[in-house]
């Protein structure tokens, strides 16, 4: 394969980096072989959270995967979302969905971080799969970060915090909800409830990672 001069220049000036360890990798290969081998992969289809029809998720939230998502959330490195979305696309059967809907973030959170990481993942997943992105949900009330709360507190925390976005028409659609991490699943459950109330035909959930259920050993 011949590589054009401009492509050679791009590789020289902006080499592709492994999104997990930042080592230089050959162009368009995604992550390095070491990280690829170490990624805590799931079987792809996991036990659905209440109110949803499926949970599609490529990684467990541990090791390199957890580091990458923490970086995506807390150190303003949205580029990592592209690679995570590629891994998600491998476990998402695109022909089963009419649209991709990100879990919303309150506008004060977006102002602080500069982006909503769930929406970023959803955008890249939409590019990878060709399934259109729809902003159907919004966060109308600020809530304490979910990861600081217990399971019961999480469910209460979300009550009334999400609502249908203006002009959203989920009626009859097969929807894929997208978030970065699924822990208890209470966010997905609350979001699915709203979409079903407004006529969604089905609601499945997808995330970059899932915390491993208690009692299950990591291998
Ligand atoms: Zn690597």
Image (cartoon, rainbow, N blue to C red):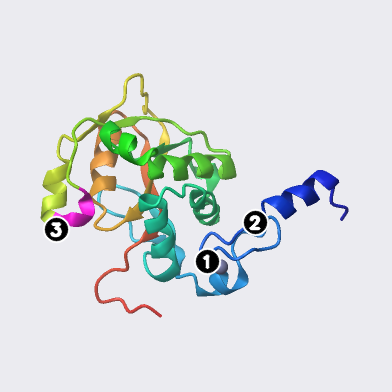
Q: Is residue 149 left or right of residue 202?
A: left
Which x, y percent locates residue 202? 37, 40
Q: Which residues are magenta?
A: 145-151
Crowd class of label 3 (few under 14; some 14 to 19; many from 20; radius 10 Å): few
Label 3 sits on a secondary structure element that is loop
> Mark 1 or mark 2: which comes first in sequence?
2
> Mark 3 or mark 1: which comes first in sequence?
1
The residue at the point 29 percent across, 41 percent down is 192
Which x, y percent locates residue 10? 73, 48
Q: Is residue 155 left or right of residue 189?
A: left
The residue at the point 51 percent across, 33 percent down is 132
Residue 16: image tag: 2
Crowd class of label 2 (few under 14; some 14 to 19; many from 20; radius 10 Å): some
User: Do the residues bearing badges 1 and 2 touch, measured as CB atoms within 8 Å?
Assistant: no
The quarter holding residue 128 reads: top right
Frontmost of labels 3 and 2 is 2
The quarter holding residue 30 reads: bottom right
Which x, y percent locates residue 34? 58, 74
Mark 3–mark 2 Cα distance, whole angstroms, equals 40 Å
Q: Which residue is mark 1?
A: 21
Q: Which residue is mark 3?
A: 150
Is 217 located above or below residue 161 in the figure? below
Mark 3–mark 1 Cα distance, whole angstroms, equals 32 Å
Q: Would residue 197 be counted in the magenta stretch?
A: no
User: Do the residues bearing badges 3 and 2 touch, measured as CB atoms within 8 Å?
Assistant: no
Q: Nearer the viewer, residue 74 or 61?
A: 74
The quarter holding residue 165 reads: top left
For label 3, being within 8 Å of ligand 1 is answered: no
Mark 1–mark 2 Cα distance, whole angstroms, equals 12 Å
Image quarter for ligand 1: bottom right
For label 1, being within 8 Å of ligand 1 is answered: yes
Residue 92 appears in the rendering: no
């Amino acid at each position: 394969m011949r590589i054009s001069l401009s492509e050679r220049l791009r590789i020289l000036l902006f080499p592709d980096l492994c999104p997990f360890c930042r080592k230089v990798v050959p162009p368009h290969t995604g992550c390095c072989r070491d990280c690829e081998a170490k990624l805590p992969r799931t079987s792809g289809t996991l036990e659905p959270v209440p109110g949803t029809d499926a949970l599609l998720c490529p990684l467990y939230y541990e090791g390199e995967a957890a580091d990458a998502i923490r970086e995506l959330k807390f150190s303003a490195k949205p580029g990592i979302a592209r690679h995570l979305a590629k891994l998600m696309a491998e476990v998402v059967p695109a022909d089963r969905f009419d649209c991709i809907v990100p879990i919303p973030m309150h506008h004060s959170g977006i102002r602080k971080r500069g982006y909503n990481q769930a929406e970023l993942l959803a955008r890249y997943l939409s590019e990878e799969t060709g399934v259109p992105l729809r902003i159907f949900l919004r966060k109308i009330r600020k809530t304490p970060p979910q990861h600081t709360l217990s399971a019961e507190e999480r469910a209460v925390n979300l009550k009334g915090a999400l609502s249908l976005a203006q002009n959203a028409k989920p009626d009859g659609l097969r929807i894929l909800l997208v978030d970065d991490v699924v822990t208890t699943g209470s966010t997905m459950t609350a979001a699915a409830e709203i979409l079903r109330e407004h006529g969604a035909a089905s609601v499945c959930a997808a995330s970059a990672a899932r915390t491993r259920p208690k009692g299950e050993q990591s291998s």
